Amino acid sequence: MKGFGLLLIIVSVFPAVHVTKVFVYGTLKEGQPNYFRMKDHNNGQAEFLAHARTVDRYPLVIATKHNIPFLLNVPGTGQRVHGEIYRVDQKMLEFLDKFEECPEMYQRRLIRLEVQDGPGGGEHTLESGSCVEAFVYSTDTYEPEWLQKPTYENYNAYGDHGLLYSEDGYPEELE
């Protein structure tokens, strides 16, 4: 029984940290308008693992008056979407759920990804060409005409599409 007391002390001093892989394809990517949110430690921890693209094709469209990128949950339609895989802690996952207005605006679901490249050398390195699963924020709730919009394989808020992203598209308490 003495060993159990030591185990209890170790568990309480070093609680298990829940981490999750998340795939971002829009404004949260590096160089995009909301990337700073991934680096803000007040939101939680996010470690870049690799660039990747979806195994299945999905329509990535820019919609609403705020020009928000939406990944429509219509597998087999659109393009193989490029983005970034992050390893996030529970606090960051909760922040992202709130930021993405999950489950009302976006729904968080697992998706299969093909790893393109990563920084390498780290404990959590993903091998180029391998397939992994990560959560993505996509939507089942969209206007039917969104399926007629141009689709993108790699979102850039400053791209030649001329659809400048507007921060007014997100809840005020997160700005």
Image (cartoon, rainbow, N blue to C red):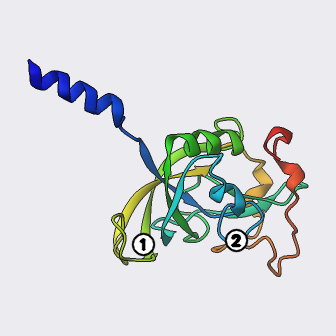
Neighbours of disc 2 within 10 Å: few (<14), some (14-19), many (20+): many
Element under disc 2: loop
Residue 117 rendering spot, x and y as whole percentages: 45, 78
Residue 99 rendering spot, x and y as whole percentages: 71, 44
Residue at horizontal 64 percent and vertical 63 percent from the top: 59
Q: Nearer the viewer, residue 15 or 89?
A: 15
Determine whether, in the image, residue 54 is placed left or right of residue 163.
left
Residue at horizontal 34 percent and vertical 28 percent from the top: 12
Q: Nearer the viewer, residue 41 or 35?
A: 41
Neighbours of disc 1 within 10 Å: few (<14), some (14-19), many (20+): many
**Quadrant position of residue 171:** top right
Determine whether, in the image, residue 78 is placed left or right of residue 126.
right
Element under disc 1: strand
Residue 40 rendering spot, x and y as whole percentages: 66, 54
**Quadrant position of residue 27:** bottom right
Q: Nearer the viewer, residue 72 or 108?
A: 108
Residue at horizontal 74 percent and vertical 47 percent from the top: 142
Q: Residue furthest top?
A: 1
Of labels 2 and 1, earlier in sequence is: 1
Marks 2 and 1 sit apart, C-alpha to C-alpha, by 17 Å
Q: Quadrant of the N terminus?
A: top left
Amino acid residing under circle 2: Tyr
Instruction: Please count the marks in the image.
Output: 2
- Residue indicated by mark 1: 115
Q: Nearer the viewer, residue 122 or 14?
A: 14
- Residue indicated by mark 2: 155
